Image (cartoon, rainbow, N blue to C red):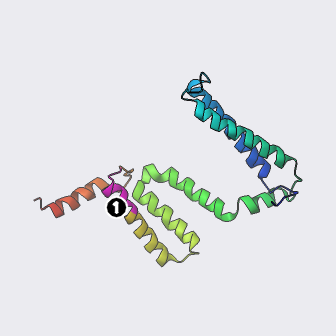
Amino acid sequence: METHNTRRPGEIVFNAALFGFSLFMFWQAYQISGFSALSSAGAFPMAMSAIMVITSAVVLIRSAGLASPGGGFAAFRKEVLPPAVLVFSLFILAYSVTLKSLGFLLASFLFLLFSIWYLERGRIGRTLLLAVVSIVGVYVIFRLVFQVVLPEGIIPERAILAAIGDFFGGSN
């Protein structure tokens, strides 16, 4: 087993957040039915979240005892938040904000287009092809096969599907 003398950038913050999340989960598990009996509905979630609290506390204490890595925010940003993570976080934020207003088809297409374009380093032909094929595949599987209702937005999806159905159904 390899031992480390210094912690990684952001390790304390991450471990503290994990400990806080574990405490929150323990509280939520307790809210199910308290600790009235070992066979109560909340007993198993409480046991699992108690294990999370204990192990995350141990990890937090151990990492607090290690030497600081130095480098400050620059080291943290380089190792924990590289440009690709920041860019994709912005893409996801934009997607979640525009999903309801633009609808699933357009918002998802734009998200895929920009994401693939960013990853492909600007090769637009392949990017466009991958985005179209992906969105058509996802749409066919989820909307047509599984009949999942997706946010419609500005593209009149129901009217288009009805027109296609009328065309193939032979309605006059």
Name, please, the residue furthest toward the left: 172
Element type at marker 1?
Answer: helix
Name, please, the residue furthest toward the top: 36
Q: Residue at x 36, y 52 (%)?
A: 152
Which is the main secondary structure of the residues drawn in magenta?
helix
In the figure, residue 30 lies in which quadrant? top right
Q: To which residue does mark 1 refer?
A: 140
* Rendered location of residue 159, percent (x, y): 26, 55
Q: Is residue 115 above or below residue 159?
A: below
Would residue 147 appear left or right of 94 to someone viewing this image? Answer: left
In the figure, residue 137 lies in which quadrant? bottom left
* Rendered location of residue 132, percent (x, y): 41, 69
* Rendered location of residue 134, percent (x, y): 43, 66
* Residue nearest the observer in this picture, 98 or 30: 30
Would residue 96 appear left or right of 27 to someone viewing this image? Answer: left
Q: Is residue 24 magenta?
A: no
Q: Quadrant of the C terminus?
A: bottom left
How many numbered markers are drawn?
1
Q: Residue at x 17, y 59 (%)?
A: 166
Q: Quadrant of the N terminus?
A: bottom right
- For the question of whether residue 156 can be seen, the reply is no
* Residue nearest the observer in this picture, 32 or 108: 32
Residue type beneath disc 1: Val
Which region of the structure is painted magenta? 138-148
Would residue 171 appear left or right of 158 to someone viewing this image? Answer: left
Q: Residue at x 36, y 60 (%)?
A: 141
In the figure, residue 160 lies in which quadrant? bottom left
Would residue 116 appear left or right of 83 to someone viewing this image? Answer: left
The crowd level at tag 1 (other Cα within 10 Å; few <14, some 14-19, many 20+) is few
* Rendered location of residue 149, percent (x, y): 35, 49
Q: Is residue 144 magenta?
A: yes
- For the question of whether residue 66 can be seen, the reply is yes
